[in-house]
Image (tube, rainbow, N blue to C red):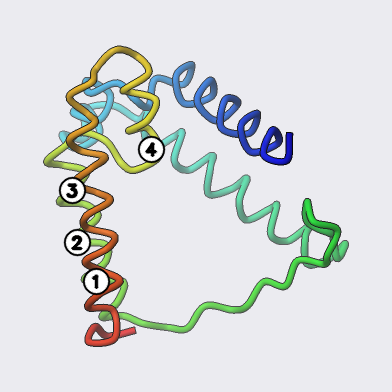
């Protein structure tokens, strides 16, 4: 019962991503070929919602699910980190056709081959943890 709120949040996230068609390989293909505004509209909407949410969290000093005030630390400027991280993220997205969020939803939609992608992403996360101290941050 302790984790039910996370399960419900994940189910809601999955429904939103499924209904908005951002898990569709065709939609991603359209985006990378600059043939449709669909994915850019969804991503732009997410950025706007995120920015408004952070603004409200800071202005209203909202509390998290654990009852403590949310302490949002400002991000450091890291051009190299953004360049390398963004490049690796984009290459992974282009090679697999999905970013990390939709991978689990795609498995749920009946593409078990994405378990290989999830395993690869997990290994990549562990590798990042191993070499993190040597990377520019």
- The residue positioned 67% from the left and 39% from the top of the image is 3
Ranked by sequence position, the earlier of labels 1 and 3 is: 1
- Which quadrant does the N terminus fall into? top right
Please state which of residues 109 and 42 is positioned toward the viewer in this rendering: 109
Q: Residue 23 at what x, y percent from top left?
A: 34, 25
Q: Residue 56 at what x, y percent from top left?
A: 78, 57
Ranked by sequence position, the earlier of labels 1 and 4 is: 4
Question: Are there few (<14), some (14-19), or many (20+) residues within 10 Å of tag 2?
Answer: few
- Residue furthest to the top in view is 110
Q: Secondary structure at mark 2?
A: helix
CB under 8 Å between callouts 4 and 3?
no
Ranked by sequence position, the earlier of labels 3 and 2 is: 2
Q: Secondary structure at mark 4?
A: helix
Looking at the image, is mark 1 or mark 3 nearer the viewer?
A: 3
Measure how far apart labels 1 and 3 are at the Cα level: 14 Å
- Which quadrant does the C terminus fall into? bottom left
Question: Are there few (<14), some (14-19), or many (20+) residues within 10 Å of tag 1?
Answer: few
CB under 8 Å between callouts 1 and 3?
no
Looking at the image, is mark 2 or mark 4 nearer the viewer?
A: 2
* Residue at image mark 2: 87
CB under 8 Å between callouts 2 and 4?
no
- The residue positioned 27% from the left and 85% from the top of the image is 136
- Residue furthest to the front in view is 1
Measure how far apart labels 3 and 2 are at the Cα level: 9 Å
Looking at the image, is mark 1 or mark 4 nearer the viewer?
A: 1
Measure how far apart labels 4 and 3 are at the Cα level: 18 Å
Q: Which mark is residue 40?
A: 4
The quadrant holding residue 118 is: top left
CB under 8 Å between callouts 2 and 1?
yes
Looking at the image, is mark 3 or mark 2 nearer the viewer?
A: 3
* Residue at image mark 1: 83
């Amino acid at each position: 019962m302790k984790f039910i709120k996370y399960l419900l949040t994940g189910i809601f996230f999955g429904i939103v991503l499924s209904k908005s068609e951002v898990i569709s390989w065709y939609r991603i293909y359209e985006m990378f070929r600059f043939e449709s505004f669909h994915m850019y509209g969804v991503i732009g909407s997410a950025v706007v919602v995120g920015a408004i949410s952070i603004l409200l969290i800071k202005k209203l000093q909202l509390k998290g699910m654990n009852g403590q005030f949310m302490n949002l630390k400002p991000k450091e400027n890291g051009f190299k980190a953004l360049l390398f991280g963004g490049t690796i993220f984009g290459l992974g997205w282009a090679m697999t056709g999905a970013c990390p969020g939709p991978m689990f939803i795609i498995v749920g939609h009946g593409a078990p081959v994405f378990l290989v992608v999830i395993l690869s992403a997990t290994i990549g996360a562990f590798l990042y943890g191993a070499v993190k101290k040597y990377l520019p941050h």
